[in-house]
Amino acid sequence: MSYDVVLPIWTALRDRFQDKVQRFSEEQFQQQLDDTTVGDLLYHTAEVEYMFSEWFFEYPNKKEIIKPSDKSGYVQLLQQSSEHFTQAMKELPKEKWNQIQQSSFGDSTPLEAVGRLMNHAGIHSGQITYIIKYGKQKDFLIDNKHDS
């Protein structure tokens, strides 16, 4: 298995995720259930893509990851993290795709790491859909706490 085989699968999943994010309204990024906002999950998704790039593909991110405050920032962050991860996959030599890499998140081959990231994005996509359907606006929750 190599970059040429994995790239179309990664791209199909990540493009679908990115398209979903781009369709959100500005307000939906602030919706939350309990202490988790849609924006929190999107930021976390990007963070993990950067971490996996370093841990399993030996391709570190040299920039600080700053949590966005609006829709365009989240869209841009997710685009950048996906591009970074794609570049990490591209630069990995073919013979390393099935070599186990040790990390604080557990040992995996780079190929397994791609599968884990796909699963990760899918889980959070479902959580985001749930928050948007059943969550409240963050500002509304904060305002109501002061009214009690």
Image: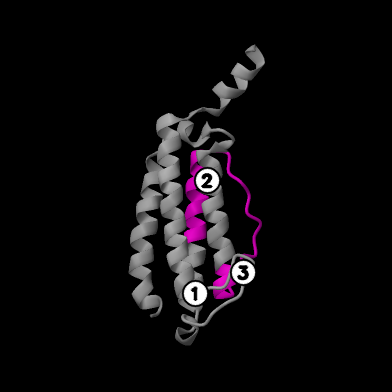
Which residue has dot 2 on it? Answer: 41
Is residue 70 magenta-colored?
A: yes
Which residue has dot 3 on it? Answer: 60
Lower sequence index among marks 1 and 2: 2
Lower sequence index among marks 2 and 3: 2
Mark 1 residue type: Pro
Lower sequence index among marks 1 and 3: 3
Eye-nearest disc, 1 or 3:
1
How are the colours assigned in the image? one colour
Residue 8 location, quadrant: bottom left
Magenta-colored span: 53-82
Residue 110 badge: 1
Horizontally, is 18 left or right of 77 in the view? left
Work out whether residue 123 can be spotted.
yes
Is residue 133 magenta-colored?
A: no
| Disc 3 secondary structure class | loop
Q: Is residue 54 above or below residue 120?
A: below
Q: Position of residue 15 (x, y in %)?
A: 36, 56
Residue 11 badge: none
Mark 2 residue type: Leu
Mark 3 residue type: Pro
Eye-nearest disc, 2 or 3:
2
Residue at (46, 48) in percent of width and height = 124
